[in-house]
Image (cartoon, helix red, strand yellow):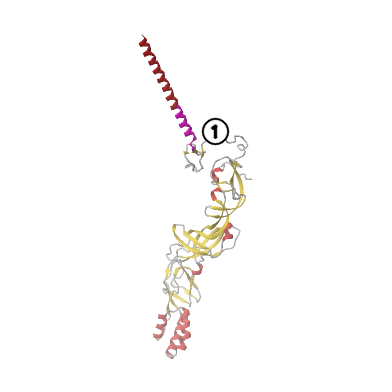
Amino acid sequence: MKKYNTITGISIFLLLLFILAAVACSRHRRIESQQEQTALSKKKQYVCSMHPQVIRDEPGDCPICGMFLIEKIDQDKNSFDTSLTDIVRSVNESVMASVKTVTPEQAALPLVIEAFGIINYDPRKIKTISARFGGLIERSFVKYQFQHVNKGQKIYEIYSPDIYTAKWNYVKLLQAYPDRDDYTREALEWFNILGLSKGQIDSLKRTVKPDYHLAVYSYAEGYAVPGDFDPEASIAGTGSIGLNDGITVETGTPLFKLIDVRSLRVDLKVKTEDGSLLRKGQKVIITDAANSGRQFVAAIDQIEPLNGGIFQTVKVYITDNERLLLPGRKIKAQIMAGTREGLWVPVSAVVDLGQRRSVFVMDGNKFVAMEIGTGVRSEDKIEILSGIDQNSRIAEKALLLIDSDGFITTN
């Protein structure tokens, strides 16, 4: 009996030890779990205020709307001021949000003026072909608009009693005084003025009696257009130029014009607000709107006076030997207007309200709309003239803070 009581006591003692060990192990596991949860709760996470499903372990921008991610805070730890002072204010005056901010930058930036325009003919390279002596055109070799004419090409044959008299006087001088070149020098100069070629003059030296017929050759190269063609008013089209067989012309009558499509004038439209930056001789990079890889470098040749409109015209002359830029084609250009020292902010931070512009300035935990004065633009930066300074923190992307149902009210 005594032996049995001893065994029972030992068993109870071992059971108590087992229970104490199990309790201690459970408590240790519970402490470890609590420590893990505490460590996880201390790890910062960042969330988008507009798209809560976007959660990241580090700061950044929301891949959906682009807004700056804010730190995720438990509801019981929210330390923001919950008073209605800011919340009840109009969204047109202030906005409670968390977006990326920037400060104005003082720097000297290059000024590049964006301009658009159209290709036109160079009026300086348009030559008028006139009748140097009167007569009847027996045969014309230039009849259609934009027909290409080479220098020295025969353009028409004429029956001319006037030129016959001059030719006959020259032949009689040669026959009477074959060794006196000084007697015929004046006649030769007159023939050169009339456009006779060297071959035509040499043939007169060999002839006994000249005739009434003469071929006329072009002294220039280009594309034929009518004599009344005005590059400022129209673009040449198709059809006849009016130099037909059988017409009678008088001395000095304009017959047609030759235009050179290798020499072109670019008429650029520049905003009037950028007119003060324009100077003659400034570098201009012209890009073909149909092919961005095709560029031409030129300089401003003429700046037209302001006419009270939205745009000011700038004229630039270029040479296109490949004849790829035809008149009437639209182009875009960049005018290099030097550099400017000033206070600059991103263009995305400025809201254009038509006659005025504004930015959103950070004030505590909210953004307040502030009207500003702006100057010129340099690529993705805009100059600040008034309203804010270098210490102001403004929203980098102002459009994210605009209420689409109302207008902005600035201070």
**Residue ranking furthest to the right:** 411
Residue at x 41%, y 85% (from the top left corner)? 205
For mark 1, give the secondary structure.
helix
Give the residue furthest to the top. 1
- Residue, disc 1: 77
In this rendering, does residue 165 appear at all?
no
Task: Classify 10 Å Cα crowding around label 1: few (below 14), some (14-19), many (20 and above).
Answer: few
Q: Residue at x 45, y 27 (%)?
A: 30
Where residue 391 sits: x, y (%)?
Answer: 59, 48
Whether the magenta-drawn stretch holds residue 38 is answered as yes
Q: Please state which of residues 350 and 9 is positioned toward the viewer in this rendering.
A: 9
Q: How many marks?
A: 1
Q: Which quadrant would the C terminus be assigned to in this image?
A: top right
Q: Nearer the viewer, residue 257 or 30?
A: 30
Pinpoint residue 276: horizontal percent, then vertical percent.
Answer: 59, 60
Which residues fall within the magenta stretch?
30-45
Residue 23 coordinates in the image, percent (x, y): 43, 22
> Can the viewer see residue 186 in this picture?
yes
**Above-or-below relation of 264 to 105:** below
Q: Is residue 260 left or right of residue 275?
A: left
209 to 313, vertically: above or below: below
**Is the magenta region chiefly helix, strand or loop?**
helix
Q: Nearer the viewer, residue 139 or 35?
A: 35
Residue type (three-letter) at the residue carrying disc 1: Lys
Q: Is residue 25 above or below residue 399?
A: above
Considering every residue shown, the one lying at the far front of the view is: 2
Whether the magenta-drawn stretch holds residue 119 is answered as no
**In-front residue for pair 287/201:** 287
x, y percentage for residue 158?
A: 44, 76
Which image quarter is the N terminus in?
A: top left
